[in-house]
Image: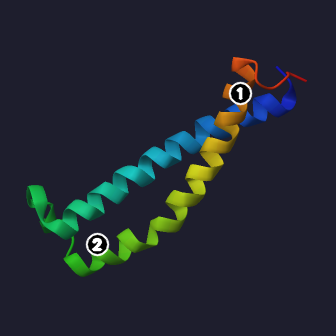
Amino acid sequence: MKPWDTYCLKTVRWSGWLLLLIVLFFFLTGYIMSGRFELDRLLDEKTALALHKLLHMPLMLLMVVHTVPAVYLAMQRWGWLKRS
């Protein structure tokens, strides 16, 4: 495996774990805002909304950081891109 491919693979793995945490926190704040499952006891609605809004940019950024190298590696595996 070439150094660039190794870098892409490590990026996909690390960003995947971070993305999982962000998505879980995104859902948690959403459920807190809606008051479902009695999660509104954890935070008040205003704080949950503020945190939920702050998560949009990290979520989008991590999605790009995760998907671009993952698609690159997948296209190599499928033979659409020539391995260097």
- Towards the viewer: 84 or 79: 79
Residue lying furthest bottom in this view?
46
Which is nearer the eye, 53 or 68?
A: 68
Q: Amino acid at mark 2?
A: Ala
Graded by Cα atoms within 10 Å as few (under 14), some (14 to 19) or many (20 or more), the crowding at tag 1 reads some
Q: Which mark is residue 75?
A: 1
Residue 80 position by quadrant: top right
State which quarter of the image contains the C terminus: top right
Q: Return the mark for residue 48.
A: 2
Q: Residue at x 30, y 55 (%)?
A: 27
Q: Are marks 2 and 1 in contact (CB under 8 Å)?
A: no
The span from disc 2 to disc 1 (Cα, nearest Å) is 39 Å
The percent position of residue 82, horizontal first and vertical second, equals 85, 22
Q: Amino acid at mark 1?
A: Met
Residue depicted at x 73% and y 36% = 8
Q: Is residue 25 above or below residue 79?
A: below
